[in-house]
Image: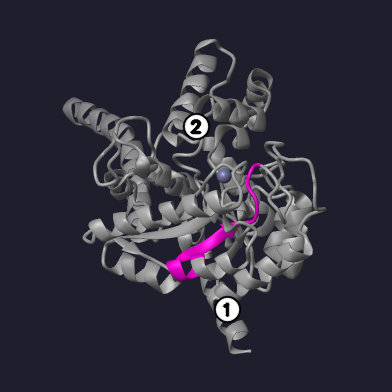
Amino acid sequence: MRRTSSFLVVLTFLLATISPLTSADTAADHARQLHFSSIVLDTHADTTQLFFTKDYDFAKRNTGGSHVDIPRMREGGLNALFLSIFIDASIQGPPAIQKALDQIDAIRVTVRDHPQDLLLATSADDVRRAHAQKKIAILMGIEGGHMIGNDIRLIRIYSALGVRYMTLAHFKNDEWADSSTDKPAHNGLTDYGKDIVREMNRQGMLVDISHVSDKTFYDALEISKAPLIASHSSCRALCNHPRDMSDEMIKALASKGGVIQINYEKSFIDQAYKDASDKATGGVVEMMDKIKKACGDDEECAGLQMKKMETQLIAEGKLPHVTWERIIDHIDHAVKLVGADHVGLGSDFDGANMPEGMEDASKLPKITEALLRKGYSESDIRKILGENTLRIMEQAEKVSAELKAQ
Ligand SMILES: [Zn+2]
């Protein structure tokens, strides 16, 4: 009797110890199963710049502080990625076009050289085909209207080369669209800017309103026949940064079928960090100008400089810690506001300061697990991970076919 009761005590103790572990394991397993069977599509990474640096190899696991490469995409289940084509917005005209073409070629050559792993995707179907073949879909987006050199014909040329979105402006105004981080010069989109949006619709190129002024966003929303994307922006209600979207803007975007792809940059997701960073650096534009002065067009130098400045400010205790859960807060805020059909992922990997716990693409399964634990349905999580962006691409393709048939 005594032996039985002590056996029961031991058994009860063991069960009490084991069962929470088992349920945690089950939740983690469930999350992994869901994550690794989904199309995980990120609409913005600046990794292209690294293709031009000597120590980086997209096919190898890199340790120099970068966020994305094939091994870490595989590890994190990131199987579709828009690589950004980017040059500083102070460069306009033919040199900006030349740089954009260099980068498009670099992406195409990288895909060509890794046919076992990569597939160049220019449609939603291509992304699904890549997924079925267990390859990573690589897509291209132009980050800033200054790269068309104020010439609408470049929309057709870039589209023919496979570019599937263009951000209407970057940190500075371009010739036809106002930026969110510059003094308004055009009151939103100029008439030429509106024609450019129409031509993007014709070409099936997604209209990206990250980086643009609020007025440019509302102008583009009115003109575009296809839904818009905010390829890498977060929620202003949680972090009041001009790069983020107000609740009113997110609602307007969603009312026309659009998607906000949440950016993981610390100063876009955490108010305390943003305030401290502004105080220490004078704000994002001033910081970029300082880096530009020190590095010129050398993007490798710019990346290193940015990292150095941040490391130094953290060491001096001038910047607070930000953890990856803030990304979940922004996803959840947008979902509560407009529903799971209008939210996606736009990390800004290799172009931003990542929060702790989201050091690189390999950490992405955490997002799926966190959303599952919050009670999100599998179907809503798949939408956020990639299906919403695919839906938008399909809509843009349909609008393009209709306009070309007219
Ligand atoms: Zn950006």
Q: Residue at x 56, y 30 (%)?
A: 292
Element type where label 2 sits in the image = loop
Pinpoint residue 57: horizontal percent, then vertical percent: 27, 42
In this view of the protein, which residue sits in the foreground, 253 or 181?
181
Q: x, y percentage for residue 394?
A: 52, 74
Image quadrant occupied by the C terminus: bottom right
- Considering every residue shown, the one lying at the far top of the view is 316
Q: Is residue 314 magenta?
A: no
Secondary structure beneath disc 1? Answer: helix
Extent of the magenta region: 158-171
User: Which residue is label 2 attached to?
Assistant: 355
Residue 263: which quarter of the image? top right
- Is residue 164 rendered magenta in the image? yes
Does the image show residue 356? no
Write down the residue under mark 1.
400
Q: Quadrant of residue 190?
A: bottom right
Crowding near the residue tagged with mark 1, few <14, some 14–19, many ≥20 C-alpha atoms within 10 Å? many
Could you tell which of marks 1 and 2 lies nearer the N-terminus? 2
Labels in figure, total:
2
